[in-house]
């Protein structure tokens, strides 16, 4: 091998041979080395959807009262806020799939770590975009920073979101420094600017013991820090609702209710993500049936926890059936939202809590189908939290047109929502085309059964 190659990973050279290491490195760098025709078509499609969303947002900001006709005094939060809550929930995927598993020494987390972290960063960024889309005067967004009052829950949300996204980006980037050196030394045929980017971002990495010690210490500190931040971001988001006078949201259970749902969504989102990545990039040797089995077990556990907090959320007001709580619950359980609500319960809680108990269902294909249903149900669950809650204010809706009592998202709103999903997928796709989506050094270290370093190959 070339004398120029500076090995980015070091360890005791015993159970993991150089040949195995080089095969693994080639497999994990393949998505970065070459982008096929279908990959370019996929990126082009996502960009087109994003541009459609930008144009829809332009129309909204110039003709808002004509294109968001259902957003009125009563339903002032529409699909944009449902989308915001969904993305905040999805952002906890990094906490669960990377930080918690890393600190509890579950070695199977290693191929999942970077996937979870990049999804978390993309999700929290798009949560912010959803908030901006919901604002009537986005040009005044900076007022929130300049003149925000600490008594306001939305200011709490801004503080934890900014802190969480900053920490998540740093936690994503620091373990990537050895990967930058890997790309710099092993990729071929790439543009000069791209190779220069790897050189700059590697920060002179040479894989010395001192560098490894500093890197691992930094990662450990950030991993510990990101867990309370991740939990707090969704708890504070729940408080935005719980501190607002609406019957559905008048609950001290909301923080735990939101966080438990976020962890369920995180597991389901991870299953869908690794299923797509392993097939698209042919990484079956690294994202194995074992990972699906472990995640299937986690899906069951998180589903039961979420069911418990759902029972807490609905049983007490349903037992009392008082006032506006009764109107809201009747609407959900047997009224016009009933089919919608029970479908979410079935696909978002009951099925993932029961079917993966069968070992055969924890195989990649059936588990991915179940997880995809959970992800869809999770979005609609946020819709059911936001919209029906607004439809039952403490002051009765009266002396207004009948259309004011109902909310139906417009084509403009749904185009912007679709664009946020396309943007998240585009971020993950572009990332995977410039950087290894699975960390080479973390997987190699895991193959050494807990040994401390990875050998230098020269």
Image (cartoon, grey):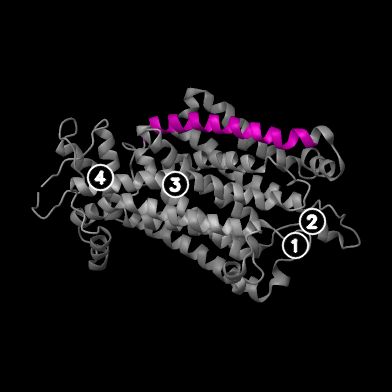
For the point 55% across and 58% down, the residue is: 159
Question: Which quadrant of the structure image shows residue 325?
Answer: top right
Measured as percent of width and height from the top left, residue 404 is found at: 82, 60
Q: Secondary structure at mark 4?
A: helix
Q: Decide whether residue 292 is among the magenta residues.
A: yes
Residue range in magenta is 288-317
Q: Is residue 436 visible?
A: no
CA–CA distance between discs 2 and 1? Answer: 7 Å
Q: Specify the farthest residue to the front.
A: 150
- Pointer 1 residue: 70
Measured as percent of width and height from the top left, residue 109 is found at: 38, 37
CA–CA distance between discs 3 and 2? Answer: 43 Å
Give residue 183's mark: none
CA–CA distance between discs 4 and 3? Answer: 18 Å
Question: Which quadrant of the structure image shows residue 426?
Answer: bottom left
Measured as percent of width and height from the top left, residue 218 is found at: 33, 48
Q: In the visual, does 392 lie left or right of 252?
A: right
CA–CA distance between discs 2 and 4? Answer: 58 Å
| First of labels 1, 4 by sequence position | 1
Residue closest to the eye, 91 or 242? 242
| 394 is higher (above) or lower (below) than 334 | below
Measured as percent of width and height from the top left, residue 401 is found at: 87, 63
- Pointer 2 residue: 406
Give residue 213's mark: 4
């Amino acid at each position: 091998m070339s004398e120029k190659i500076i090995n980015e990973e070091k360890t005791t050279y015993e159970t993991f041979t150089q040949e195995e290491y080089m095969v693994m490195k080639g497999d994990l760098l393949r998505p970065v080395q070459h982008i096929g025709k279908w990959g370019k078509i996929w990126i082009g499609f996502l960009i087109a959807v994003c541009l459609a969303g930008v144009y829809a947002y332009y129309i909204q900001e110039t003709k808002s009262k004509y294109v968001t006709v259902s957003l009125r005094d009563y339903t002032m939060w529409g699909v944009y806020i449902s989308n915001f809550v969904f993305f905040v929930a999805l952002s906890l995927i990094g906490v669960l799939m990377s930080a918690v598993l890393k600190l509890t020494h579950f070695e199977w987390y290693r191929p999942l770590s970077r996937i979870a972290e990049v999804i978390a960063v993309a999700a929290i960024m798009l949560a912010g975009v959803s908030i901006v889309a919901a604002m009537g005067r986005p040009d005044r967004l900076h007022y929130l920073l300049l003149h925000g009052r600490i008594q306001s829950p939305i200011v709490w949300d801004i503080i934890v979101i900014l802190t969480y996204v900053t920490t998540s980006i740093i936690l994503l980037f620091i373990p990537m420094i050895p990967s930058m050196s890997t790309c710099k030394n092993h990729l071929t045929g790439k543009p000069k600017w791209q190779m220069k980017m790897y050189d700059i971002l590697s920060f002179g990495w040479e894989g010395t013991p001192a560098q490894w010690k500093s890197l691992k210490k930094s990662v450990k500190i950030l991993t510990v820090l990101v867990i309370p931040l991740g939990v707090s971001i969704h708890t504070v988001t729940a408080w935005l609702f719980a501190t607002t006078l609406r019957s559905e949201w008048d609950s001290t259970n909301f923080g735990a209710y939101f966080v438990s749902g976020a962890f369920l969504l995180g597991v389901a989102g991870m299953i869908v993500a690794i299923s797509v990545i392993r097939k698209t990039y042919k990484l079956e040797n690294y994202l194995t049936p074992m990972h699906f089995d472990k995640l299937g077990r986690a899906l069951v556990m998180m589903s039961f926890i979420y069911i418990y907090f759902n029972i807490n959320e609905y049983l007490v007001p349903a037992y009392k059936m008082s006032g506006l709580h009764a109107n809201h619950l009747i609407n959900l359980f047997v009224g016009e939202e009933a089919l919608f609500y029970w479908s979410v319960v079935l696909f978002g809680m009951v099925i993932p809590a029961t079917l993966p108990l069968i070992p055969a269902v924890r195989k990649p294909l059936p588990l991915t189908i179940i997880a995809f249903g959970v992800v869809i149900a999770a979005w609609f669950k946020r819709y059911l939290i936001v919209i029906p809650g607004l439809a039952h204010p403490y002051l009765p809706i009266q002396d207004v047109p009948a259309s004011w009592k109902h909310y139906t998202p417009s084509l403009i709103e749904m185009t912007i929502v679709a664009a946020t999903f396309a943007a998240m997928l585009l971020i993950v796709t572009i990332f995977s085309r410039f950087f290894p989506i699975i960390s080479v050094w973390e997987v190699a270290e895991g193959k050494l059964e807990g040994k401390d370093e990875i050998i230098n190959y020269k």
